[in-house]
Amino acid sequence: MAKPTKPPAVPTVPAEELFAQGVEHQNQGRWAEAEAVYREVARMLPRASAVHWNLGTVRKHLGQWKEALDAFRKAVSLDPTWRGRDFNIGLCHQKLGHANEAAESFARAVAAEPDDPINRFNLAAALRDLGRLAEAVVHTETALELKPDFIEAELQLAKLRTALTPRWHVPMMNDIERNAAYEAALTAAVRPGDIVLEIGTGSGLLAMMAARAGAGHVYTCEADPVIAETARAIIATNGYADRVTVIAKPSGTVTVGKDLPRPADLLVSEILSSDLLSERVLPAVRDAKDRLLTPEARIIPQAGGVRALLAESRVMERAFFVEEACGFDLGEFNRLAPRAVRLDRVVPFTPLSAPFQALTVDLADPQPGQSWRSHLAVPVTADGRCVGLLQWIWLKLWDGVEFENSPLTPTEASGWQPGLYLPRRPLDLMTGETVEVTSFHDGHNVWLSLKR
C-alpha cells in the first residue's frame, strides 16, 4: 500500500507585508481590497492597533458604519492616543442614528481640538439632531469663524437660523396696527412702580414699551438663549438695560425670589399662534397666575377669539382641490388633501358670509386642558362656491383696545397667518341657506369644520 503524500506547502505572506499591501490599496482608493487585506492582518495580529484603525477607516469609506465603529473602538482600546478617535467614533454614531452618542463623541473631539472647524461642524449637526438648535448655532458660527470659506457650515447655519427663528418674527415686528394696539394697552394698564412680567421676549419690543409706559421694572423671559441674547443687545442699544431684565429660560422655570424680586403686577404675553392657542398660551398664563403674579394682577391680552367667514376663491380652490384633469376624474385624490392649511399671504377671495366669532377664550383667567365646542348656523349672504372657512384671530388687549388680523383689511406685514379650514369638496351655496360650523378647542388645538 502506497504511503499517502502530504499536500504541497502554501507559502505564507508575512503580516507586515500584507499590511503594506493593504496600505497600498487604501492609498489608491481600492477600499474593498484594502478591507479584505486588513481583515486578514487583524486575524493574524489581533492586538495591532494600527491594523484596526486602518480597517475602521476603509470601512468608513465603504459605508459599513457599524463595522467601522467596532474597528475604531478596538483600535482605541489598544491605543487610546489616536488623533481623531472621537471624531471618527462620533461620525459612526451619527451615521447609525445614535444622536446622543454622536454628540458626546464630537464634544470630546471639540474639547481636545477646539480650533478644528470640522469637529465644531459635526458637533453642531449632532446637537441639531437632538433638537438643541441654539447650541448648534453657536458651534456652527464658531466653525465659520475658524474657516470663513466653510460652505457646508454656511448652509447649516442658514437652516438652523430658519428653524430657530421662524419667518413670522420679522413681519410681526413690522405690524404697525398690532404694535399700536399693544402700546395703547400697555400705556393704559401700566402703573408707576409696577413690576411687569412678559412671557416670550422675542425682540424685546413689548418689554421696552412697558418700560416706556412707566413700569418700575420689566422682567421678560425667553426660552431660546440665542434670541434672549439678541434681545439683551437690542434693549441695551435703546437705553433700557437698567429697567428691563431678560431671563433666558421658559416661564415655567421662573421663580419668585430668584428671577423675580416679588410677584408681578402686570403680565403681558404674545405667545399667540395663528389659531390663537397652539403655542400653549393658556397653560403658560395659568402657571404665571398661580405662581408669579399678585392676586390682583392685570393681564394683557384679556381675551382672545377665533373669527371666520365662508369664502369663495378660484385661486384657493385650484391650490387645494382637484376635480378633473386632461379629461380624467381625479376627485378621489381630495381624500388625501389636508383639511386645514396656513396661507403665506391673503389671495383674492369673495366673502359668502358675514364674519362670525367661532370661539372666545378668557386669557385673563385661562382654564388649560378643558375642551370646548359649539355649533353655529352661519347664514350664506352671497351665491358662490365655498372653498372653506377663512380664519383669523381677534384680541381684546385692554378695555377699549382690540386687534384682529382680518383678511378683509389686510396689512403690509403680520406675523399671524390666516387659516383655511376646508370641506371635503367645494360647496355650491345660495343666498339665504345656512352652513353648519362646529368650533372646537382642547386648550391648545383649535379646529373648525363645516357642512351643509
Image (tube, grey):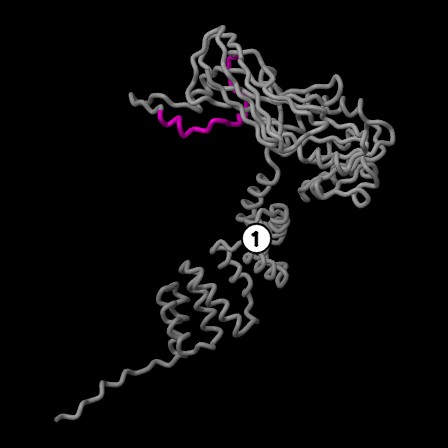
Q: Is residue 67 something one can see in this rendering?
A: yes
Q: Quadrant of the N terminus?
A: bottom left
Q: Residue at x 45, y 73 (%)?
A: 51
Give the percent coordinates (x, y) of residue 409: 61, 16
Q: Secondary structure at mark 1?
A: helix
Give the percent coordinates (x, y) of residue 229: 71, 43
Give the percent coordinates (x, y) of residue 372: 60, 26
In this picture, residue 302 sits left or right of residue 421: right
Please say whether residue 343 is one of the residues in the magenta stretch. yes
Give the percent coordinates (x, y) of residue 188: 80, 22
Q: Residue at x 39, y 26 (%)?
A: 334
Q: Which residue is mark 1?
A: 121
Q: Residue at x 67, y 22 (%)?
A: 395
Quarter of image, res 59:
bottom left
The total of numbered circles placed on residues is: 1
In this picture, residue 415 sits left or right of residue 206: left
Quarter of image, res 375:
top right
Q: Outermost residue, left direction?
A: 1
Please say whether residue 150 is one of the residues in the magenta stretch. no
Q: Residues within 10 Å of mark 1 (few under 14, many from 20)?
A: many
For the magenta stretch, what is the residue range?
332-351
Q: Outermost residue, top direction?
A: 432
Q: Is residue 239 something one can see in this rendering?
A: no
Q: Is residue 95 above or below residue 334?
A: below
Q: Outermost residue, right direction?
A: 193
Q: Residue at x 58, y 45 (%)?
A: 157
Amino acid marked by disc 1: Phe
Q: Nearer the viewer, residue 215 or 276?
A: 276
Quarter of image, res 423:
top left
